Amino acid sequence: MQQVTHREVREMLASGAQIAETLPRHEYETTHITGAIHLPLHRVFKQAREFLAIDRPVIVYCRDAL
């Protein structure tokens, strides 16, 4: 896992990356990045394959990351 800049995130999304937000449900419902998949942190490693395509890069976002 690596940190990326805001510019890199935009470039990755433009190239087909997917974004998973680990925000608590109430925060995700009120303020999330358009197109983001809600995947709470405690579920990222357990359920990522159910929600994310394995052939595309994934950006994981938490409230302090961007």
Image: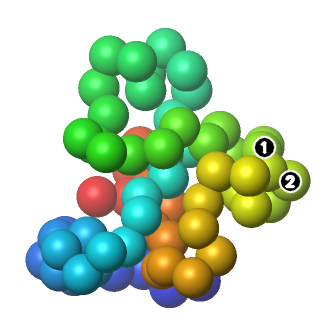
Three-letter code for the amino acid on which mark 1 is drawn: His
In which quadrant is the C terminus drawn?
bottom left
Answer left or right for 66 relative to 49.
left
- Contact flag, marks 2 and 1 (Cβ < 8 Å): yes
Q: Helix, strand or loop at disc 2?
A: helix
Please tell me the numbered disc located at residue 42.
Answer: 1
The residue sitting at 42% across, 58% down in the picture is 19
Counting other residues with Cα less than 10 Å from the Cα at mark 1, is it few (<14), some (14-19), or many (20 or more)?
few
Q: Would residue 9 be visible to someone looking at this image?
A: no
Q: Position of residue 28 (x, y in %)?
A: 43, 26
Answer left or right for 61 relative to 44.
left
- Which residue, given by chain and number where applicable, does mark 2 sit on? 46
Q: Position of residue 34 (x, y in %)?
A: 24, 41
The residue sitting at 50% across, 61% down in the picture is 60
Three-letter code for the amino acid on which mark 2 is drawn: Lys
Name the mark nearer the viewer: 2 or 1: 2
Pick the front one: 38 or 4: 38
Answer left or right for 13 relative to 44.
left
Q: Position of residue 29 (x, y in %)?
A: 40, 18
Q: Would residue 46 be visible to someone looking at this image?
A: yes
Q: Quadrant of residue 40?
A: top right
Q: CA distance from mark 2 to mark 1?
A: 8 Å
Q: Helix, strand or loop at disc 1?
A: helix
The residue sitting at 55% across, 21% down in the picture is 25
In this picture the colour scheme is: rainbow
